[in-house]
Image (spheres, rainbow, N blue to C red):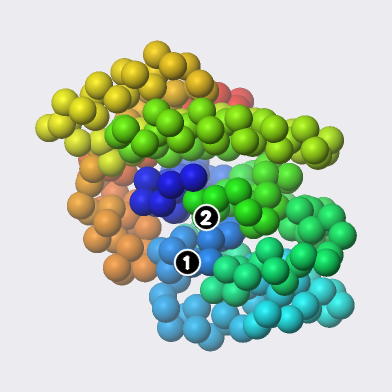
Amino acid sequence: MKGGVGKTTSTVEIATILAKEHKKKVLVIDLDPQTNATLSLITLDAWEKIKDTATIADVLGIKRGMSSRDEEFDIKDAIIKNVNGIRNLDLIPSHLELTFLDLDLVSIPARESVLKNQISKSDLSYDFILIDCPPNLTLAPQNALIISDYIIVPVIPEIFPAIGLPLLVNRIRKWKKSFAECNVDFLGMVFTKVDGRYSMHSQQMDALRKKNVIHCFSTIIPQNADISKAVAQSKPATIIYPNCAGIESYKNLVKEIILKIGAA
């Protein structure tokens, strides 16, 4: 529930590594109205060409603040195949209109299950679907939670997570009780943007591990300038800087994820 912790970066790099290194068929769904995952995988010009006709806004039934559900939009029409030339990596881009999703779908029955219904009625075939969410528990992330198996929580080892992580866990577990069809669980937290020069980071990681709120991945993602620079080029750092320290860490994290869920 905090911005700037590496949610989008983790989604994009994990997805790219799964597709490129492990030959998995992967779909990234960008549910954040800031569209950062989208613009990490396609250029702004490419997004401008499709933003009003084929994005997650159309999938969820909103278009410039008006319902488009009656048009029976096919989720497949929003999928960009082999995005950025990366074989087996597909994308459903985001739209700024997601900012108003809660208002646009306020009168829609089972509005938390719109994405689930769209995916269920389509013959999608993926090994992994990764959903990038905004830092809140509003309607967009609720749509993600209903259909997901697991949650991965990126955490910067600072003071806030010691308070925010237990709150997030409690809120989601409480929310799940209202939806019998929701089976999502926490796969674990991963420490991101870790700076080895700061003793505070080491201390906070130890403190969070001892709290044992949820599983903690052993892989640590270091602060890395190359990952940040890749975003400006609308490409995953895995493609541009495949040997940088940050990407080597993400490769190890992906191996941990695959092992933990038994998806080798």
Circle 2 crowding by C-alpha within 10 Å: few under 14, some 14–19, many from 20: many
Identify the residue under disc 1. 34
Q: Is residue 149 rendered to the left or right of residue 214?
A: right
Image coords of residue 72 (percent x, y): 84, 74
Cα–Cα span, label 2 and label 1: 8 Å
Identify the residue under disc 2. 134
Visible residue check, residue 27: no
Sequence-earlier tag: 2 or 1: 1
Circle 1 crowding by C-alpha within 10 Å: few under 14, some 14–19, many from 20: some
At horizontal 29% and vertical 68% (from top left) the residue drawn is 232
Q: Is residue 131 rendered to the left or right of residue 126?
A: left
Amino acid type, residue under disc 1 in the picture: Gln
- Disc ID at residue 93: none
Image coords of residue 260 (percent x, y): 55, 24
Looking at the picture, tell me which residue is in the foreground, 178 or 37: 178
Vertical placement of residue 35 versus 17, above or below:
below
Q: Are marks 2 and 1 in contact (CB under 8 Å)?
A: yes
Q: Choose top left, top right, bottom left or bottom right for residue 254.
A: top left
Per the image, label 2 sits on a secondary structure element best described as: loop
Vertical placement of residue 134 versus 232, above or below:
above
Amino acid type, residue under disc 2 in the picture: Pro
